Amino acid sequence: MYTQKNNDRFLNYFILNYITNLVTQQLYIIQGLMKFFYTLIFALISTTILSQNTYLHCGKLIDTKTGTILTEKTVVVSGNKIIKVESGYLDGNPDDITINLKNKTVMPGLIDMHVHLEQETNPNAYLEKYTASEADVAYNSVGFAEATLLAGFTTVRDLGGSGVNISLKKAINKGRIDGPRIFTAGKSLATTGGHADPTNGNKRSEIGDPGPKDGVVNSIEDAKKAVRQRYKNGADLIKITATGGVLSVAKSSSNPQFTVEEIKEITKTAKDYGFHVAAHAHGDEGMQRAILGGVKTIEHGTLMSTKTMDLMKKYKAYLVPTITAGKEVTEKAAIDGYYPAIIVPKALEIGPQIQNTFSKAFKRGVRIAFGTDAGVFKHGQNAKEFAYMVEAGMPAMTTIQCATIVNAKILNMRTQLGQIAPDFFADIVAVNEDPTKDISTMENVVFVMKDGKVFKQ
């Protein structure tokens, strides 16, 4: 029978169930509110962090586009980009960062179009070719990259190494090590016995017959394959050695070492892969072949004739003079035993002529790009090139433009590098003095920002 006891039991069950459901609902509401508040707090913190800008108060600011010096400007950086440049010294929000550069001259991060980050000159360099492992080369390159960045060169074009330079680029891009933004050729291309033949100087049993995979080209087909191999390896451009060179263990410093047809095939294939081509060249005939073949830049250009200068103007090629390297090899050649004997006469022949050739080329209207050949001298001393260029007749402001907007254009980065302007990468450096009045101040960069991050202050 249905009793009062059963009724009470049912009522208790109903009440308990009601209360349980009510509590559960309240818990869900509380959990939802907690999630909401956590999300809100996280969003507020994230917004604060993400919206934290850096305000650079610049006493003098070089406008590389117009070649003028502006005064009392504020550059606002957000993330890795410049978002605005304003007149006067503006302040941001309390959470923003302000950097005082009111007594400095500020300019875009500098670009060196000819470095070798895997190596640096020393009396044992030629022995190290046989004793240093790939790991040794990699560890050394870390210090070379950092020295370059701290000297104010936030972007470089690495023109030849073993391939470690490609790994170095990747490590920097991933933030594992400090260094400049790198555009690299990987391994340079040469002909058999040419300036970048990796087996030059080896004993006969180790000379072998390197081919396109190793960067050695002797035909049209080799040319295609060598470029494609560089693409596969992760290079950003192609570098050829169009003539003999000073520091290779080979006799000639200047003989032509590619045919025009081979160079044309290299530049044609390079274009398919979005590459431009740089050509090491000291000798005049090799330069002419390179220009006719379609290269973008001539490196060194030591024995360039007026005919070749006019050819460069016609084909809109650029000269990368590397005056500092010329002076360095001349100096080191005078030290007994510093270089192998076969190199000394080449260094004494070529080194002293580079600055004078640059002067003639500039005055004749040849396009000039800033590049040093750092590695032939100590990394971090790249800015010596500015004073040598001024000494040879180029205005100080023009040298800075060569190292910024001109080089950015060659790298196809004209809307991202080389200027301090909205939407450009926040690559910014500063020096103590006005370089148009004292160009040597470029050798003492006191502030370095790359991609919005301060590396030196």
Image (cartoon, helix red, strand yellow):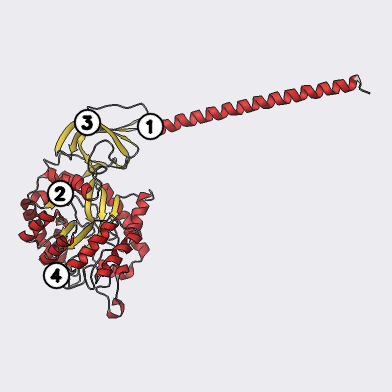
Q: Position of residue 339 (x, y in %)?
A: 20, 68
The residue labelled by disc 2 is: 386
Q: Compared with residue 332, is residue 402 higher up or lower down, i.e. above or below? A: above
Which label's residue is closer to the chain start, 2 or 3? 3
Which residue is at the far top?
4
Q: Which mark is residue 73?
A: 3
Q: Is residue 148 visible?
A: yes
Whichever of labels 3 and 1 marks the residue nearer the N terminus, that label is: 1
Say the numbered circle drawn on residue 255.
4
What SS does tag 4 mark?
loop
Q: Is 145 in front, or is 199?
A: 199
Question: What residue is pinned by disc 1?
Answer: 51
Of pointers 4 and 3, the one earlier in the residue sequence: 3
**Precedes in sequence: disc 4 or disc 1:** 1
Marks 2/4: CA–CA distance: 29 Å
The residue located at (22%, 40%) in the rendering is 419
**Residue 334 seen in this snapshot:** no
Q: Mark 1 packing: few (<14 Cα in 10 Å), some, or many (20+)?
A: some
**Amino acid type of the residue tagged 1 in the rendering:** Ser
Rendered location of residue 383, percent (x, y):
19, 49
Which residue is situated farthest in the bottom direction here?
Answer: 205
**Which mark sits nearer the N-terminus, 2 or 4?**
4
Q: Is residue 408 left or right of residue 52?
A: left
